[in-house]
Amino acid sequence: QVQVVESGGGLVQAGGSLRLSCVASGNIFSINAMEWYRQAPGKQRELVAVITKGGSTSYAASAKGRFTISRDNAKNTVYLQINSLKPDDTAVYYCAAAATGSMADFRSWGQGTQVTVSS
C-alpha cells in the first residue's frame, strides 16, 4: 500500500505563488508515477501534472508555463510550484500515486489541499 499526504495550500492573491508538497509513504518502490490533480467547485477533477519514476514530466495544457512538478527522492516528496496564480486556479489540489500492486495497478489519493486565489 501507498499513502500520500498533501500540504501547502492556502489563500493567496492573484499573481502570487505557492508550492504544494506531497509526501509518499508505504511501499514507495511500487510507485510508477506521481500526479497532481485539481478540482474546482462544480467541475470535474482534472489532471494537472505528472512526474514518472524515471523523472519525465508532463503537464495539462492549462498548466504549461506556470506549473512545475518536481521531486526530492530523499524526502519521498513531490512538489507542485504554481506561479502567477489566477482566480481560475482556485481548487482543491490532490496528489495521487500511480502504483503497481500484487494484483493490479492502483492509484492512492491524498485528502487534498485547498488553494484559493483572490482577485
Image (cartoon, rainbow, N blue to C red):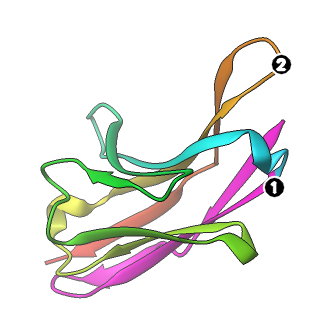
Residue 14 is tagged as none
Circle 2: residue type: Ser
From the top left corner, tell me how far across and down residue 78 is, in percent. Answer: 56, 66
Left or right of 108? Residue 56 is: left
Q: Is residue 25 above or below residue 14?
A: above
Q: Which residue in the protein does label 2 denote?
A: 102
Position of residue 6 measured from the top left corner of the image (x, y, whole percent): 61, 62
Task: Write down the region rendered in magenta.
Answer: 1-25
Q: Is residue 86 left or right of residue 44?
A: left
Residue 41: quarter of image: top left
Choose the circle earlier in sequence order: 2 or 1.
1
Q: Amino acid at mark 1?
A: Ser
Q: Position of residue 72 (x, y in %)?
A: 61, 75
Which residue is labeled 1 in the image?
25
Residue located at (34% from left, 41% from top)? 47
Spot occupied by residue 18 in the image (x, y as percentages of width and height) = 38, 81
Vertical placement of residue 99 versus 118, above or below: above
The residue furthest top is: 103
Question: In terms of secondary structure, where does tag 2 sit?
Answer: loop
Q: Quadrant of residue 88?
A: bottom left
- Image quadrant in which the C terminus is located: bottom left
How crowded pointer 2 is (Cα within 10 Å; few <14, some 14-19, many 20+) is rated as few
Q: Is residue 39 left or right of residue 13?
A: right
Q: Quadrant of the N terminus?
A: top right
Q: Select label 2 or label 1 by which is in front.
A: 2
The verdict on residue 22 being magenta is: yes
